[in-house]
Amino acid sequence: MRRLLVTGGAGFIGSNFIRYWVNHHPDDRVVNFDALTYAGNLENLCDIESVAGYRFVHGDIADRSDVERLLEEEGIDTVVNFAAESHVDRSILGSDAFIKTNVLGTFDLLEAAKYVWKDFSPAQRFLHVSTDEVYGSLAPDEPAFTETRGYAPNSPYSASKAASDHLVRAYHQTYGMSVLTTNCSNNYGPYQFPEKLIPLVLLNALEGKPIPVYGDGMNVRDWLYVEDHCRGIDDVINDGKPGQVYNIGGENEWHNIDIVNLICDRLDQLQPGAASYRDQITFVKDRPGHDRRYAIDSGKMRDELGWTPAHDFTSGIERTIQWYLDNRDWCERVRSGEYRQYYREQYGQSSA
Ligand code: NAD
Ligand code: TYD
């Protein structure tokens, strides 16, 4: 039986992970520690609230004493760190929160675990959830990122994640903490905050708004269904080697414009309007420092841990589109307040 502290468990991947974990490991203790920023939403877990063994605690990973108290009180043996500022465009508008949470917050979390765990036992594990974006951008014909690829982050977001990855590594090398780092490709699925490409396209299409595609739309991302990511983290927690890095990806590369077209075409079938949703596609000014291509080589996950994605893109995107169609009220609620201000700043008054 494990006793998990899941940070950022009210966000997109964290909430999917908690749902996955309580379903697959019903005897474990799961403590969700989340600051409830604009991206954190307890409604994502309303079906889990009353599950025995689950507890939510409101807090900031940068509050070291709060974390220490919780680690002791709950006898935590496994930390899974999802808590982060996660949106590249926001990091370009202003990166203070990214440095505070992603860099300093991860440092505080590591310090708290080091203080409470003292002499590390092999059962104690600190899993840090990171991203393929730390590796920078690939040329069209370059092989996908492996775990030995050098870091070359290009956005304040990816630079802050890279910094946190280095700190996590150092706590293994220096102090012998059993850390594990996962670098995952773009996730998609239910509960993703609608500032990210797939839900933004879906909702703008349905609401008759312009669908903003940055630059020429030919940037490539490697998409993984969120549940496959959660299962990969489970495999790494249980069978990963301390101090190791594991790349998790879908081996599923798409040009942005092809995904946007695919969503529009599917909506044309599911919710036909007077004109095709493709007519709403609007090419807009490119994102500064926009990485051209990401692709993950998941060979180590496959060969060492026997992990492969269970969901293909056709079924995953279908489930995702259907989820957003069925949960328009969730979308409305999470987009109230702060998000409206961000949207105006990012996309301009006319498209709000
Ligand atoms: P998200 O933005 O949806 O959720 C982040 C969560 O962290 C929110 O619940 C928020 O309230 C919480 N949080 C933020 N600051 C906090 C703090 N200081 N203390 C405690 N909680 C705090 O993010 P996501 O898309 O679910 O990503 C989760 C993690 O996975 C991040 O570390 C991200 O870098 C990484 N990741 C994301 C993707 C992706 O495609 N979304 C891909 C690879 C890696
Ligand atoms: P995003 O979902 O923000 O993820 P990331 O930047 O972490 O990969 O964006 C995915 C891709 O879609 C990325 O190449 C940027 C592009 N994009 C647009 O073209 N328009 C948009 O409005 C957004 C949010 C993203």
Image: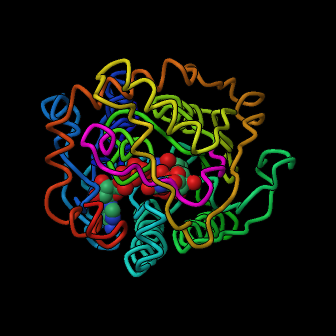
- Using the rendered image of the protein, determine whether residue 127 is visible from the camera's viewpoint: no
Name the foreground residue: 197 vs 168: 197
The image shows residue 306, relative to residue 284, as above or below, that is: above
The image shows residue 348, relative to residue 122, as above or below, that is: below
- On whether residue 212 falls in the magenta region, the answer is yes
- x then y, percent, for residue 266: 42, 23
Name the foreground residue: 16 vs 329: 329
- In the image, 67: left or right of 162? left
Seen at 36% across and 40% down, the residue is 3
The image shows residue 230, relative to residue 196, as above or below, that is: above
- x then y, percent, for residue 259: 54, 36
Seen at 48% across and 73% down, the residue is 107
The image shows residue 306, relative to residue 102, as above or below, that is: above
Colour scheme of this structure image?
rainbow
Name the foreground residue: 332 vs 123: 332
Name the image quarter holding the C terminus: bottom left
The magenta segment is: 203-221
- x then y, percent, for residue 281: 45, 46
Q: Which of the 4 image quarters holds residue 247?
A: top right
